[in-house]
Image (cartoon, rainbow, N blue to C red):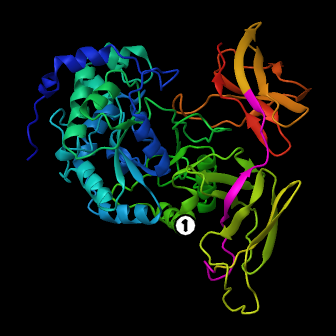
Amino acid sequence: MPRIRSLFYPFCLCLMFLITNLSVSAGADDPEQGSLNKQERLEWFRDQGFGLFIHWSVDSQLGVVISHSLVGASPEYTNRFFNDLPKSFDPDRFNPVDWARLAHLAGVRYVMFTTKHHSGFAMFDTRTTPFGIMNTPFHRDIAKEIFDAFRAQGIAAGVYYSPDDFWWLHQNGKTIERSVPDVQPRNNPGLMQYDQAQLQELLTHYGKIDALFLDGEAVGLRDLAWKLDPDIVVTRGAIKTPELTVPGMPLPGAWETCMTMGTAWQYQPQNEHYKSGGELIRLLIQTRAKGGNFLLNVGPKPNGELPIEEEERLREIALWMFVNSDAIYAVRPWVITNEGDIWFTKKKDNSALYAIVESDTPWPRATWREFTLHSVRATDKTEVSVLGQNDEVVEYHPEITPKSNWHQENDGLHVRVMQAQRLQDNFRWPNPAVLKITNIQPALTPPRVQTNASTPELSGQQEILEGEVLDMGDRSSLEVGFEYRPILGEDVNSRSSAWIATPAQTISKPGPFKAQVEGLDPKGAYEFRAVVRHPLLPLYGSEITMKR
């Protein structure tokens, strides 16, 4: 029989918490404003580099978008969702130990589990609501089992929590909506108390929680988290967490990009198109080259198994990370992110630079390749090697000594290396190889560009974009311009549109520049960024929303 749960529990929170938290703004435009994240904990977070997101809830049974189908739903659909779906949720093949072992093999350092998504269904044992996992045939605390299993593999535990709660809105006679003031916890004291009670349960009943992802307004919640555990890292709600996109340039400090394996966050058995394992590895590389963490999502099936497509991709990542994880953990950006298809990360203690070689075609084993790294200058102590191999032997080729070598020229560091290790039966491992280079210096000073402001004109169909070159670097002239795109997606963090470039301008000294764009939707939302077209790669300013 389901346990009877008190709905008065939310009111047991300390009044001090409520008064303090309600007065704190989450800083929607600048999530770092007022942040109490400790710098040493943010450094720890940046060192981890690779996390596993898990989107899973009661509506996975339908293969429907997680939670959002309730917005605009009929009373009949809503009642079936809240009353009938829990009765059939019984993931009898759920084995979090298997998930955790696979995540560990793939190089995952922290997990972020959806303890409660927007629907309000609690995937943890809570006294606050009957709408949760303990009132299903499964009747086990899924969150606890996941955190225990992942910690046993040395993976830090992270809580995803939605302040929005459609079940609470429905129970209190409010229209189910998102991102409008009337349904926000800050405007509903009962919902705020309810959320605070649940968050207190999650942060006090489940052992050490290292990170918290607040998918909604963080007002009244992130400061409660810091009060309960000053060492917790609040991600969304206190740092930038773009979805489905990797920023053009490194963002300052800690940040995290959230990426699906396909197009959906939760399991969808049809109408789904998965990225290849190689694509996901490249997104991981590019995120780390820009200083961010890569939070890769999986959506378990309703029976508790991972879809085979997701397991296969994690295993492809596992092989690449088994060989190359040194280039991912405890790294920071190099002076530039990439030279064409060669991406860079460097150890934060400057002990090594990693040049990660992407290619549209596999690099056949036992073949030499030569690269010129224009941004790198050697010293008399420089050493070059390929991660994973000893540079001494090529199987079945005793006549070859695959010793990496280099020489410095005016145009950069020239390296000659061989892919010597056999990773797959066909001798053509398709994913990037990584060069480790030690005792080197930067060979260039890149320009610096800043995105400034935008000004609408006429009926909102035109916009004047403003940027500024702060430093020419080592260039006497530069091409500059802008890129802009409509903001589309599930929320303000999500992006799904391609960038559109303005015509380039040539400048010969630092200073401001402008461009006009036309044909904009007067009711649309857009963002833009300034760009410098350096001969090696484009360099970008920050991405700013047009004030329209």
Q: Is residue 417 above or below residue 297?
A: below
Q: What crowding class fits label 1: few (fewer than 14 Cα within 10 Å), some (14-19), or many (20 or more)?
A: some
Q: Residue at x 43, y 26 (%)?
A: 72
Q: Position of residue 296 (x, y in %)?
A: 50, 50
Q: Position of residue 385 (x, y in %)?
A: 67, 70
Check if residue 213 falls in the magenta segment: no
Task: Determine the secondary structure under disc 1.
Answer: helix
Q: Residue at x 34, y 38 (%)?
A: 232
When asked about the image quadrant of residue 75, the answer is top left
Between 546 and 116, which is closer to the camera in this rendering?
546
User: In this orientation, does residue 85 appear?
Assistant: yes
Residue type at the position of mark 1:
Glu
Q: Position of residue 311 (x, y in %)?
A: 47, 64
Q: Position of residue 481 (x, y in %)?
A: 82, 28
| Chain part drawn in magenta | 422-449
Q: Which residue is mark 1?
A: 316
When asked about the image quadrant of residue 409, the answer is bottom right
Specify the quadrant that holds the C terminus. top right
Check if residue 440 falls in the magenta segment: yes
Q: Residue at x 18, y 39 (%)?
A: 126
Q: In screen coordinates, is 189 left or right of 450?
A: left
Q: In screen coordinates, is 178 left or right of 119?
A: right
User: In this orientation, does residue 296 appear?
Assistant: no
Q: In screen coordinates, is 340 left or right of 92?
A: right
Between 324 and 132, which is closer to the camera in this rendering?
324
When asked about the image quadrant of residue 465, the answer is top right
Q: In screen coordinates, is 422 left or right of 234?
A: right
Q: Residue at x 67, y 78 (%)?
A: 391
Q: Is residue 279 above or below residue 370?
A: above
Between 190 and 81, which is closer to the camera in this rendering?
190
